[in-house]
Image (cartoon, grey):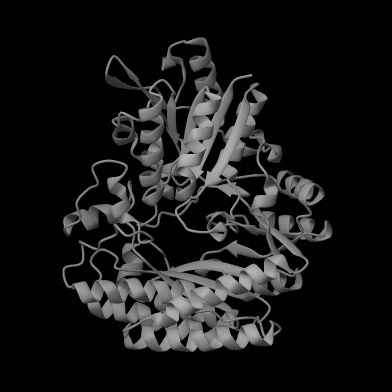
Amino acid sequence: MSIVYLVNIIPGTGAGDIQHPPLGLAYVGTALKKGGYDVRVHQILPEDIDSLVDQILKDSPLFVGFSVLTGLSSYYSAIMSKTIRSRNPKTPIVWGGWHASLTPEQCLGQEYVDIVCIGEGETAAPEIARAIESNKPMDSVESIGFKSNDRMVFTPPRPVERNVDNFGLDYSIFDIEQFVIRNGDKRTTSFYSSRGCPFNCAFCCTPGMSDRLWRSHSVRYVVEHLIALKDRAGINDVYFSDDNFFVNRERAFGIIEALRGAGISCSTFDVRVDFINRPMLDRLAKLGATGIFFGWESGSDRLLNMMHKQITRDQIISCVKLLSEYPSIAVWGSGIVCLPTETLPEYEATVALALKMFDMIPKGTISLFQYMPLPATEFLDLALADGFKMPENPTDWARVDPQGQFYDVTWIPWLTDKGKRNVRMTQEYMRHVLRKTDKDANIVFRTVQDTFSRIAQHRVRSQNFFLPVDCDLYSLFRNTWEFARRVS
């Protein structure tokens, strides 16, 4: 039986960074397994690249497939692909995922990439495997790019599978225990119940990837798979990672109610601000839902309009005010700073709105994230017009990732070096330190957390980040507490 390796590299430094199960690879791996292949799924940190390369070369796989996102993901995928290529030039390397699908020519133009899979890989991957195994031409496989006689060849696009229930999901191809979040009696994992999004936010590459097509698994599919996980790994809680879980509201509540009947609670859902209302929250609270995530994006109505968010600053405030009436539901709100064309007053308004909302919520956090120029988005064109230089290869895309050392804001003319540091530290404090805990949480934990949160609020409000030792101390506190909780 031929071996196929599927790899997802998660930029990060610890186990908490890879807690989300690699469901994209699981779908593709399931299709390959059904096709008769021995599938090895690996989700790793950058520090694990060399040891996994050793293992791959020892097993001489049919091919190595990478799931690639834009930014540090493409950077590290390139590093690992180069390493494999330098040590065994005959090992075929296939790139798939969002970045490969949105920049196929650039990815295939690299000497360390042999094939790119454009779009979903559930059908393409087994066909690629069979073509490699039988040494047959690749031109019969739809929606891919490959090299032939030193030139790039792209095959016609594959029709989109409308019924995503046709895609199987076999959890036996990886160790689900690695991706279970333990908190007391809760054993939580994530799940995607749908693909795509019907909206067209100008900073987001989902519209370019899915053509604004939203496809959902049936209630039965979702519930059966999560019950199977309960039986297999004791999963009794789930958070849904869909771009928009409530596109079809009755379907969404059908899933929540059916899972509740099966003894599985629901932690968090992604919801649009303009979808949130009192009847929804009443129903969620009654069903025991414990969290809502939403992208509020900006404190500037001008920028919200440019983003096609179809919401206003006043709507955001009203939404959070309403959420504050439901103390059992944690609020996770995400905003963006350093958007193309953003002015200093608009940046300050966004920070001020974030702090205002944090004061209002009962528990959770309101975070800020530096803008990330993504391929196939309207805002990328705005960033290019204001000085951003288009990345030339997959490693160069590391410049767009705010989580990495290579990130640099070049499209905001008023932002000084000191301003860039302040923005970076604002992101750090609001995403990783600022948090409200449940009133029933351990009193020691809550007291320490509240102390650090007050310091973070002061620093962000004043934009004073002189000697931020408290940030390092907070990381030590959180890591120590999480480790103690896991081993207890």
Does 164 sit left or right of 70 as displayed?
right
Residue for point 40% across, 89% down = 458
**Residue pictured at 28% horizontal, 54% vertical:** 399
Rendered position, 314 above or below 130: below
User: Which image quadrant is residue 482 in?
Assistant: bottom right
Left or right relative to 473: residue 423: left
Tell me residue 264's x, y (percent): 77, 59
Identify the residue shown where x is 45% and y is 49%.
Answer: 46
Q: Residue 440, located in which quarter of the rendered image?
A: bottom right
With 138 as the anchor, is 277 left or right in this view? Answer: right
- Please say whether residue 480 is visible from this viewpoint: yes
Q: Nearer the viewer, residue 372 or 6?
A: 6
Q: Quadrant of the N terminus?
A: top right
Residue 338 position, x and y percent, is 29, 68
Judge whether residue 378 can be spotted in this image. Answer: no
Q: Residue at x 33, y 81 (%)?
A: 349
